[in-house]
Image: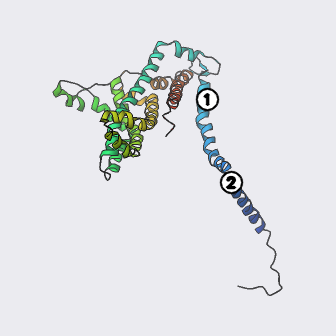
Amino acid sequence: MPTLSPGVTPPPPGPSSEPAARAAGSVRRLAGALQRRPRLRLAALLTAPLLWLVLAYLGSLAALFLSAFWTTDSFTSEVVRIWTSRNFEELVTSPVHRTVALRTVTVALAVTALCAVLAFPLAFYTARVAHPRRRPLLVVALLTPLWAGYLVKVYAWRLILSEGGPLDWALRPFGLSGPGYGLTATVLVLTYLWLPYMVLPIHTALVQLPESLLHASADLGARTVRTFVSVVLPLVWPAVAAGSVFTFSLSLGDYITVQIVGGKTQLIGNLVYSNVTLNLPLAAALATVPVAVIVVYLLAVRRSGALRSL
């Protein structure tokens, strides 16, 4: 490699190296600014996902709400962009729509309550009773149904609940029969589908529950029920609230399960699906009902204080 003789100055940098040097300096200045301003760094990280959320999610909700004020041509079923509130008036005045909305909310609440009742003993066993080496395997076993396809699970339950199916065969010696297809079958299948979403947060909360609190409750003479009500439930309640958001919202918007095992039962999702091609503005108005119910439910859960410690 040639060396420069003493007294010989190095040649000036070429013109191609100047833009690279300026770019490197700009990058260093930007990195320094982000390092000194954590709020600016956080804003830079969240701008892209928040922009996507506003455009894709909130934008679609705004378009949905806007189209609910349109109407359709009674002859061609084409959407007519004329501002009217007739669709919402029909939702309020129609007994059928009120009944379906009330039935949908009742089904979502029933599924949420059943998931909570079933999830507690399962999560307590996996978190506090089972051997520590077996706990990961048990959690994986509880979450395994999530790996199966949605339609596969629902059609499997359709076979189980069918007349003369496995459930009828198991109950026949006791003089009983299965529920068949209908509202009970819908609640049962939805509970099976969304149960893992309730088990996982409760399991996590029970794992973090201090063992000393349980021992202190027992030392003070509290029985099992009193310990559960006064010690365990208040500490695990935020996890129940988090799981209920999933089970309630997923049940509220489901319509495929109702079509497969619900018999003649109709929920809001079925009405939306049946009106998409015939009366799109009415379907949009119907779709705003679950959104409004979810918002009210989230506000109620937040007001109860159950989400503060999540």
Locate residue 33: give its quadrant.
bottom right
Q: Position of residue 150 (x, y in %)?
A: 39, 38
Q: Which residue: 41% across, 30% down?
A: 256
Q: Is residue 26 left or right of residue 113?
A: right
Q: Earlier in the sequence, mark 1 or mark 2?
A: 2
Q: How many marks?
A: 2
> x and y percent of residue 139 in the render?
35, 46
Residue assigned mark 2: 34
**Residue 71, image quadrant:** top right
Residue drawn at 47 percent across, 31 percent down: 249
Can you tell which quarter of the image residue 254 is in? Answer: top left
Q: Is residue 95 above or below residue 280?
A: above
Query: Which amino acid lies under the numbered mark 2 shown in the image of this protein?
Result: Leu
Q: Secondary structure at mark 2?
A: helix
Where residue 12 sits in the image (x, y, percent)?
Answer: 81, 74
Drawn side of residue 87 relative to residue 24, left or right: left
Q: Can see residue 74?
A: no
